[in-house]
């Protein structure tokens, strides 16, 4: 029987709304450079390798940050950890606007590095928040809701940038300043609204009982970061994040691909990105609903998550055909299909962590896993940038082939590492039933 949210309270959705807002700001900041890439390349005379170096700078910092930010958030708590993260990325995001043309390459590399450190805290904090505030049967749906905000940020970026910045690059600095006020508002609302459920004065006993209805009691003793590292379950999750390189390919190289293949410039990228990322949002929501619905029907968490991941992997396969499409809109729809499948894949893979690990280890494991995805994305950026400079657009052919077939291959290895998804207790030992 499905519990009626109205009878138990819905304060947890206020918390989720703030996670949605933070991730929207995060992805708007992250997407600006990708949207302006063709314009900035012409304005500052960057080669594809220069552009790849800027993307790699962000990802190196993001990957390194994930390793320690996840542990910091587990140690000092979500409230303070999330605040530090958003304050850091907002500062470095606005710093882009101060870069002078003579130092454009080194300046952007430095600013993107700082942005990456700050943004690395978002997903460990967000997933930990969902684990704290939602029962297992609702976590995929809750994750799908906040993960949909990544597409909201990516949708807003081309429209706001297109309305402000000219094709020649006039007023390119303004979009980087846009999120400062939003970030300040978010910090105010976060400190006014958030606390751990068991300590929150505005949370009803009925809602607290519902939140903890399918979770094992936990001690307050911290689990060291190094203790999560050897677990097969940690590396099973890490494998699922390898596909983050595909998502970042759409985000940071998608506008360049559409410009070089179909002549879509900064003033016309808004509508294609709107289509792609609305489809991605649909994938986030449907993916979360699907596995949750299967669990409510009596399926095991293991079966529900993995069948959903398998369906996602199959849906994504046609994206491999994008480079041979003659029609811009067929290419856009195929990329949108790939983005939708990825988002569903992503939110179901995120929930693998709190499904298996205790809540107090969630941010650390998310950080380790996401770092692996970033490392793969760095290699992909360097390779793609080098190939595009030497062989024109042939690099996109192989990028889309890999994008199409990577998910189904990875899922096979995930199942080998974690065949039953047996939960782990406070000592990271298998829970005996």
Image (cartoon, grey):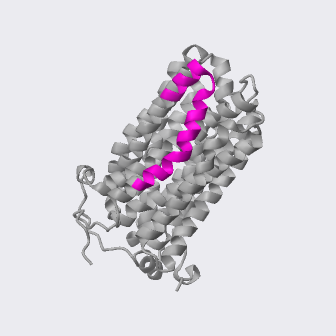
* Percent of width and height locating residue 246: 53, 42
- Locate residue 11 relative to residue 261 in the image: left or right: left
The residue at the far bottom in this view is 1
Q: Can you see residue 21?
A: no
Tag count in the figure? 0
Residue in view at x 74 percent, y 41 percent: 270
Q: Can you see residue 230?
A: yes
Taking the magenta stretch, the answer to whether it contains residue 207 is no
Q: Tell me where residue 231 sits by quadrant.
A: bottom left
Q: Main secondary structure of the magenta part?
A: helix
Question: What residue span does the magenta drawing correspond to?
Answer: 383-412
- The one nearer the camera, 54 or 233, is 233
Residue in view at x 44 percent, y 55 percent: 411
- Look at the picture and state if 50 lies above or below 286: above
Q: Tell me where residue 97 sits by quadrant.
A: top right
* Percent of width and height locating residue 104: 56, 19
């Amino acid at each position: 029987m499905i519990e009626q949210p109205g009878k138990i309270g819905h304060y947890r959705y206020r918390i989720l709304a703030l996670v949605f807002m933070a991730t929207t700001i995060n992805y708007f900041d992250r997407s600006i450079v990708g949207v302006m890439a063709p314009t900035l390349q012409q304005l500052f005379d960057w080669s594809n390798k220069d552009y790849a170096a800027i993307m790699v700078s962000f990802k190196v910092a993001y990957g390194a940050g994930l390793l320690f930010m996840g542990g910091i958030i587990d140690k000092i708590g979500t409230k303070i950890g999330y605040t530090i993260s958003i304050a850091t990325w907002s500062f470095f995001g606005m710093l882009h606007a101060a870069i002078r043309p003579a130092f454009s390459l080194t300046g952007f590399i430095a600013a993107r590095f700082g942005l990456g450190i700050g943004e690395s805290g978002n997903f460990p904090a967000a997933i930990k928040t969902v684990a704290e505030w939602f029962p297992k049967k609702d976590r995929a749906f809750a994750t799908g809701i906040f993960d949909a905000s990544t597409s909201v940020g990516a949708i807003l970026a081309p429209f706001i940038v297109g309305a402000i910045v000219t094709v020649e690059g006039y007023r390119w600095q303004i979009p980087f300043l846009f999120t400062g006020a939003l970030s300040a508002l978010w910090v105010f609302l976060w400190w006014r609204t958030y606390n751990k459920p068991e300590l929150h004065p505005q949370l009803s006993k009925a809602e607290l009982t519902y939140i903890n209805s399918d979770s094992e009691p936990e001690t307050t003793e911290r689990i060291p970061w190094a203790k999560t590292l050897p677990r097969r379950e940690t590396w099973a999750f890490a494998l699922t994040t390898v596909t983050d390189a595909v998502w970042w390919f759409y985000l940071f190289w998608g506008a360049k691909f559409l410009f070089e293949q179909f002549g879509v410039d900064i003033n016309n990228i808004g509508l294609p990105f709107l289509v792609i990322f609305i489809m991605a949002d649909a994938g986030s929501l449907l993916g979360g609903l699907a596995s949750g619905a299967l669990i409510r029907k009596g399926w095991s968490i293991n079966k529900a998550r993995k069948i959903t991941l398998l369906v996602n992997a199959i849906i994504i396969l046609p994206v491999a055909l994008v480079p041979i499409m003659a029609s811009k809109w067929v290419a856009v729809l195929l990329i949108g299909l790939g983005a939708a499948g990825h988002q569903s894949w992503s939110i179901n893979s995120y929930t693998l962590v709190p499904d298996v690990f205790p809540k107090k280890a969630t941010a650390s494991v998310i950080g380790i896993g996401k770092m692996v995805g970033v490392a793969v994305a760095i290699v992909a950026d360097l390779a793609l940038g080098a190939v595009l400079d030497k062989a024109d657009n042939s690099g996109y052919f192989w990028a889309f082939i890999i994008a199409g077939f990577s998910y189904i291959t990875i899922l096979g290895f995930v199942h080998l590492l974690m065949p039953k998804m047996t939960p782990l207790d406070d000592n990271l030992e298998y829970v005996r039933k």
